[in-house]
Amino acid sequence: MSDRLRVLFVCVANDARSLIAEAVLRHSGSEHFEAFSAGVRPTAVNPRTLTVLEHAGIATQGLRSKALEEFAGMSFDYLIDLCDKGSDELALLPQSSETLTWSFVDPVKQEGLDGFRHVFHELSDRIRLFLMVKNRPHDPEGMTHPHR
């Protein structure tokens, strides 16, 4: 069994934001984290998502839109909602130890790549902070050590 923390990023379509977050976390924190993404109502991957990731040097192979149902019965250490869903849709989400909400504007509604670049940079910054906080060493009892 893996000691890596499991993170599921969720948004409506799983065509941009959550896929970007999944790819960035895999790229940045693969040693300590397993990253997944899903959509409440998934659609096809937006090609601009792949373009922005590839321009940043982040692998895109295997990225695909997935429905929440694909993760039924699984549990995650962190479930991160990227579009601030209502309570009805949150009831569909898989089990997680901690649920976070990081609301980001959907870049699909904008022309060109600028919105995608902006969301990519914002998500990259947020994930970098998340990794700094969550990568702190832990003792065997699961208590985080104070700053050294």
Image (cartoon, helix red, strand yellow):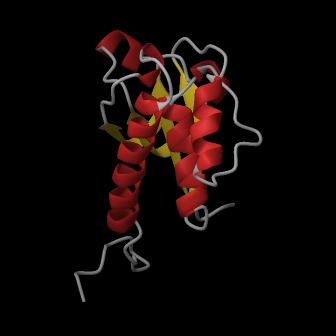
How many numbered marks, from 0 up? 0
- Split into 4 quadrants, where in the image is the C terminus? bottom left
Name the one closer to the observer, 111 or 7: 111
Question: Along the horizontal axis of the image, is 146 left or right of 141?
Answer: left
Name the one closer to the observer, 36 or 17: 17
Quarter of the image for residue 3 reads: bottom right
89 relative to 19, above or below? above
> Which residue is at a point 63% across and 36% down the rendered structure image?
51
> Which residue is at a point 33% across and 30% down the rendered structure image?
104
Residue 89, percent from left and from top: 40, 13
- Split into 4 quadrants, where in the image is the N terminus? bottom right
> Which residue is at a point 64% across and 35% down the rendered structure image?
50
Name the one closer to the observer, 11 or 6: 11
Question: Along the horizontal axis of the image, is 38 left or right of 100?
Answer: right
Residue 127 in sight in this render? yes
Quarter of the image for residue 83 reads: top left
> Which residue is at a point 54% across and 62% down the rendered structure image?
29
Name the one closer to the observer, 121 or 131: 121
Residue 113, percent from left and from top: 50, 30
Residue 74 in sight in this render? no
Residue 103, percent from left and from top: 30, 30
138 relative to 104, above or below? below
**Residue farthest to the bottom?**
148
Residue 141, percent from left and from top: 39, 74
